[in-house]
Image: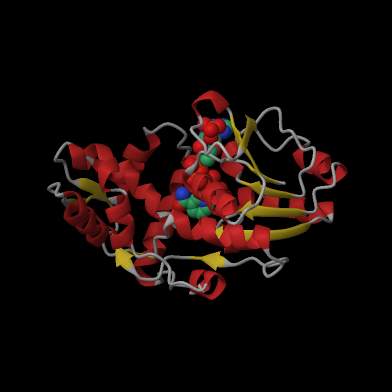
Amino acid sequence: MILVTGATGNVGRHLVGELLTAGAAVRALSRNPATANLPSEAQVARTDEMPLDGVTSLFLNPAAFWGGLGDLLPRAADHGVRRVVMLSSAAALDDDPSNELASHHLAVERAIEATGMEWTFTRPGEFATNTLAWREALSAGEPVREPYAAARSTPIHERDIAAVAAKALLTDDLVGGKPVLTGPEVVTHPEMVELIGEATGLPARFEEISPERAREEMLGRPYMREGLVDVLLRLRAQAVDAPVEPSGEVERITGRPGRTFKEWAADHADDFR
Ligand SMILES: NC(=O)c1ccc[n+]([C@@H]2O[C@H](COP(=O)([O-])OP(=O)(O)OC[C@H]3O[C@@H](n4cnc5c(N)ncnc54)[C@H](OP(=O)(O)O)[C@@H]3O)[C@@H](O)[C@H]2O)c1
């Protein structure tokens, strides 16, 4: 039995589908199983109950554990869970101690390593789904306002992250691996706005603003703390001169090319309208 945490999320929902298609037994967790809308072939349970009986492998998405993991890992080891596949982050590559995205993911990676269970840490970079934050502006005919228009990105489709996670759960190929996952191409945010415009038919415009103004706006959003805002802005600034190159890992691991942002925008056109 494979236990999927964050099962209703961007990555989790596709992962549940992939695992079921491969014939695996899946227990999918949500804070609210009644509204989770997960496939009937999956057992659905509450995240806070964390039923571990019969579970041999665990997909761990930190987004489902904002309050911390509690005793999840020692309990999993006690229940005979043999493998943990974690949705970590490419941020874990940054050894700057002020990068809280890095320290948050590294702390979970280290806690998993300390259990002695088998592990894979998938380390994606920028999710294409982050652009859903532009929905409000785009559907209202407003421009997307951001700093660093020249920053280059390698946005990854959540389906590709799920495909790699499925491989890590279903085969032994990725045990002990920390694959850095990116999309297959380099694009800028203004280009991504344009691609969303083409996919949706919405008038899509990008307007560059100063980093200072962006900082102010970001601090006004829920869940945004000063340290996190500073890291996010620093990463965008770095992506102007030293962008992340496509890693090629999705194709190497899954045998199919990673999905482009154009494909992502077509898949999500309805989400913007
Ligand atoms: N965004 C990026 O660019 C990026 C880059 C690298 C790594 N990552 C990693 O990927 C993770 C996000 O993955 P994702 O997009 O698949 O996750 P997600 O869709 O944001 O969330 C997954 C599920 O977690 C549950 N959840 C959400 N907020 C919660 C909260 N406050 N407390 C408890 N449960 C909560 C929800 O399920 P229920 O409502 O059903 O309980 C949600 O469907 C990040 O946390 C980070 O670790 C992200």
Residue 130 spot, x, y in % from top left: 38, 48
Q: Nearer the viewer, residue 45 or 97?
A: 45
Q: Is residue 231 visible?
A: no
- The scheme the figure's colours follow is secondary structure
Give the image quarter of residue 238.
Answer: bottom left
Q: Is residue 60 visible?
A: yes
Q: How many marks?
A: 0
Q: Nearer the viewer, residue 212 or 142?
A: 142
- Reply above or below: 47 against 210: above
- Residue under the point 28% across and 44% down: 134
Residue 127 spot, x, y in % from top left: 43, 54
- Reply above or below: 202 against 171: above
Name the image quarter holding the C terminus.
Answer: top left
- Residue under the point 36% across and 71% down: 185
Residue 196 spot, x, y in % from top left: 23, 53
Q: Nearer the viewer, residue 270 or 41?
A: 41
- Residue under the point 44% across and 45% down: 229
Residue 19 spot, x, y in % from top left: 59, 52
Which residue lies most toward the right here?
78
Give the image quarter of residue 54.
Answer: top right
Q: Nearer the viewer, residue 251 or 26?
A: 26
